[in-house]
Amino acid sequence: MSRQLENKVAIVTGGGTGIGEAICRKFAREGARVVVNGLPTDPIDDVVQLIVDDGGKVIAFAGDVSDDAQANACVDAAIERFGQLDVLVNNAGILLADVRTAPRPSIELRHSRDGTRNKKIIKKM
């Protein structure tokens, strides 16, 4: 049976629990070499051990990818260990209780399908 992610390298942020953990394990079963990213307090080493026990190739990267330096270090770790990076699953997130945001005009997003402009808009949000 052909594995769909054979010889691919994936970083999964928020990979220590829940959906992120499931993605890490599924990608590894499909042949990907996986970087399990999570905060230093997340159980990423447990996920790594489960993947290793199942015969997968995987490393842990503990770091907060909302910080540019740590996000870059995560990418560097993937490339240093596996020689490439093919897939990035941005699964990490935070819940801010009782936070109100200013409304953004939808026209701004509709007219910004260019990837560079989208990155700038997202950073502003």
Image (cartoon, helix red, strand yellow):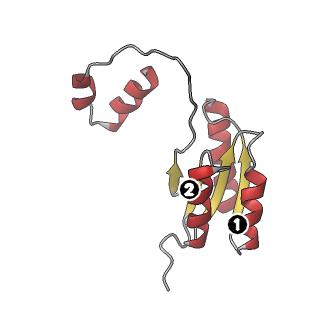
Mark 1 burial class by Cα count in 10 Å: few <14, some 14-19, many 20+: many
For label 2, count other residues whose C-alpha is less than 10 Å away and answer few (under 14), some (14-19) or many (20+): some
Q: Amino acid at mark 2?
A: Leu
The CA span between labels 2 and 1 is 19 Å
Dot label at residue 51: 1
Task: Kindly identify the residue that appears in the image at 51 percent across and 69 percent down.
Answer: 5
Q: Amino acid at mark 1?
A: Ile
Q: Which residue is at a point 62% across and 38% down the rendered structure image? A: 71
Q: Which is more N-terminal, label 1 or label 2?
A: 1
Taking depth in this image into account, of 31 and 93 the one nearest to the observer is 93
- Of helix, strand and loop, which one carries label 1? helix
Per the image, label 2 sits on a secondary structure element best described as loop
Residue 8 in the image: above or below residue 3: above
Identify which residue, 37 or 71, lies in the foreground. 37
The C terminus sits in image quarter: top left
Q: What residue sits right under mark 2 in the picture?
A: 85
Of 79 and 22, nearer the camera is 22
The reply, left or right, for residue 113 in relation to residue 90 is left
- Residue, x 51% and y 77% (percent of image)? 3
